[in-house]
Image (spheres, rainbow, N blue to C red):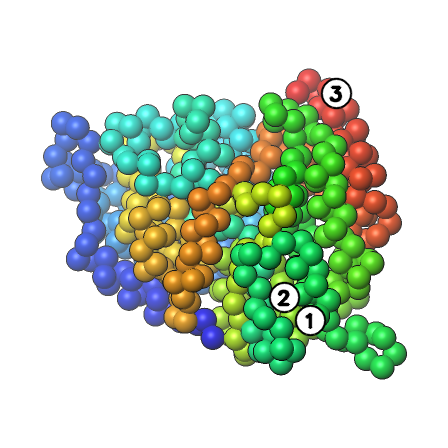
Amino acid sequence: MMRKKLTAGICSMAMLMTTIGTVTVIAGESAEDKKNMSGEITFSFWGIPEEVAVQEAITEEFNKEYPNIKVNLDHVSGAADFNTTILTRISGGTAPDVFYMGEVMVPIYADKGVVEDLLPYAEQDSLDLSDYWDGVLSPAGYHDGHLWAFAKDCTPYMIYYNKDMFDEAGVAYPDSSWDFEKFKETCIAMTQTDDNGKVTRYGIAPENGWPAWFNIAYKNGGKILDEEGKRMVVDPNTAEALQFYFDLANVEHCATNPDDMTSMGGGEIDAFKSGLASMVIGGRFMTYFLKDFDGNYGFTTFPIEKSEVAPLNFVALGMAKDSNNKEAAWEFIKFYCGKTGQEINSATGMGMPVMKSVTESGVWMLEGETQEQLDVILKQFNNTKDHPFHPEWMKLMDDIFARNMTEAARGKTTALEALENAAEEANAYLEEVGR
């Protein structure tokens, strides 16, 4: 089993950091000047209660290098209303200096002009951005000469599988060589039914949301937006991939669909943990939620059909444009997203490092995880493609795309029809709002 006690992992990593922390020095400013920098900043973040311990550990290490910068931790309990809360504070003149930003929100905050461009700060400090994965730099505007947020952790989406169930069924563990057909065969082989033909265990409880949908589309060479990233397109490769994905539930009956999950009364991870599914889909955070799983599991990539590329999901740190202590805020962001902060943060199993050197070191991996699994992860980090980010994401993807695709996932329409309806509605909306 892959397990590590959260608190113990954080504490032991924090103890190690006391001896290896470093200070990056701005040209013309001494390390002593840096140490004497003073100020007070507020850092707002969401997350489960255990995540507070991570922020406390990182802040404690930060204060060993910057004892005169006070960091006020502001834990906003849930992610659902977080952006509304932050935007309300920004408009009211009470914005936190530093705050969490989900990957899809980066272009939205940038478009509103409420976040500081961090690239000048990074360049002033001669920060080696080549040590950061392109999959987290590109979505933050790096290739357009900006850095609207600095990713703190990231993850590709992967397939998690129950090793015990695979052993029991005599089915080989999946690996990154599988294609769509092999994926389907595995799902079917791992599905069990009773004497009446009712499914008692599904091969997979697939996520039905944009992270999984975009992943499977990309693996088939698909796209969601046009080349300029301005309009939604009806791409045949995307339609083919999504139809394949939805057919696992509605034709092959080896996967759950949204209605199945509703009737089960839980989420996909619950189905996996309770033995109702042999595989499940998710990011690195799955290892945290499986820490008490009574069994053995592994993980591998999405099946690859026409392309190896995959997007990275991430959480970033943004700086409010109206912050009154920008230098102190930057030092905190830089520390958090640097080697020390990365090693503390990634030791929890909730995310992976954004620095290449830390990722490749494997210091963040959990007990029982192997070099082979690290190689699977690195392969994905080296073959990334951005999600179809857009300033109107919430309307285009969270509303229009998700609403239409959910109907296809339920078997009420085809993936192609759902794409056509979504593109027509989305592009009409964009014309209406002058985008």
Mark 3 to mark 2: distance in Å? 42 Å
- 39 lies left or right of 312: left
132 left or right of 386?
A: left
How many labels sit on residues? 3
Report helix, strand or loop for mark 1.
loop
Please state which of the two labelled residues, at mark 2 or mark 1, is closer to the viewer. Answer: 1
Label at residue 279? 2
Q: Looking at the image, tell me whether mark 3 or mark 2 is earlier in sequence order.
A: 2
Where disc 3 sits, the SS reads helix
Residue contact at pointers 1 and 3, CB within 8 angstroms: no
How far across and down, in percent of the image, does residue 435 sit? 66, 20
Residue tagged 1: 190
* Dot 2: element: strand
Q: Is residue 281 left or right of residue 119?
A: right
Q: CA distance from mark 1 to mark 3?
A: 48 Å
- Mark 3 vs mark 2, foreground winner is 2
Q: Residue at x 57, y 38 (%)?
A: 387
What type is the residue that disc 2 sits on?
Met
Mark 3: few/some/many CA within 10 Å (<14, 14-19, 20+): few
Q: Tell me which numbered mark, 1 or 3, is placed earlier along the sequence.
A: 1
Residue at the spot x=26%, y=27% of the render? Answer: 124
> Mark 3 is on which residue type?
Glu
Q: The residue under label 1 is which amino acid type?
A: Met
Residue 333 position within the rendered picture, expressed as x and y whole percent measured from the top left: 34, 41
Which residue, given by chain and number where applicable, does mark 3 sit on?
A: 432
